[in-house]
Image (spheres, rainbow, N blue to C red):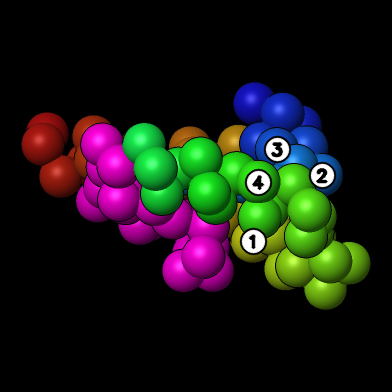
Amino acid sequence: MLKNFNIILSELPVLVSDIPQHRELPLENYRYFQKGNIGELSKRLVELFKMGISEKEKEKYISLIRKNYNWDKIAEKTLKVYEKIL
């Protein structure tokens, strides 16, 4: 999962709908589009593919993934949930 997530955020122009689950990812505001707004989605897709992704943005997302989305962090968070309910 980490490898796939890393590829997605570091190599592709990511565009996601503006819903709470996606807002948990600290993406730049221009990487969100209003849910259900097909016109905005289409426009943003064209813009993002023309723009691509900068090396600085790639490094930011790779660092984010390594810090927050690794198996040690996931296990730690899962353990805290179990400890809380037991």
Q: In terms of secondary structure, where does tag 4 sit?
A: helix
Measured Cα–Cα span from mark 3 to mark 1:
13 Å
Instruction: Give the foreground label among 2 and 4.
Output: 4
Q: Quadrant of the C terminus?
A: top left
Q: Which mark is residue 8?
A: 3
Please tell me which residue lies in front, 50 or 31: 50
- Relative to 83, 39 lies left or right: right
The residue under label 4 is: 46
Q: Which residues are magenta?
A: 17-37
Residue drawn at x 64%, y 61% is 64
49 within the magenta span: no
**Upstream in sequence: badge 1 or badge 4:** 4
**Upstream in sequence: badge 1 or badge 2:** 2
Q: In terms of secondary structure, where does tag 2 sit?
A: helix
Q: Which mark is residue 64?
A: 1
The kind of residue on which mark 4 rests is Val
**Residue 24 location, x and y as percent?**
37, 56
**Residue 73 location, x and y as percent?**
53, 48
Q: In terms of secondary structure, where does tag 3 sit?
A: helix
The kind of residue on which mark 3 rests is Ile
The kind of residue on which mark 2 rests is Glu
- Against 28, residue 32 (above or below) is above
Instruction: Give the foreground label among 1 and 4.
Output: 4
**Residue 44 location, x and y as percent?**
54, 51
Tell me if label 2 and label 3 are in contact, CB under 8 Å.
yes
**Upstream in sequence: badge 3 or badge 1:** 3
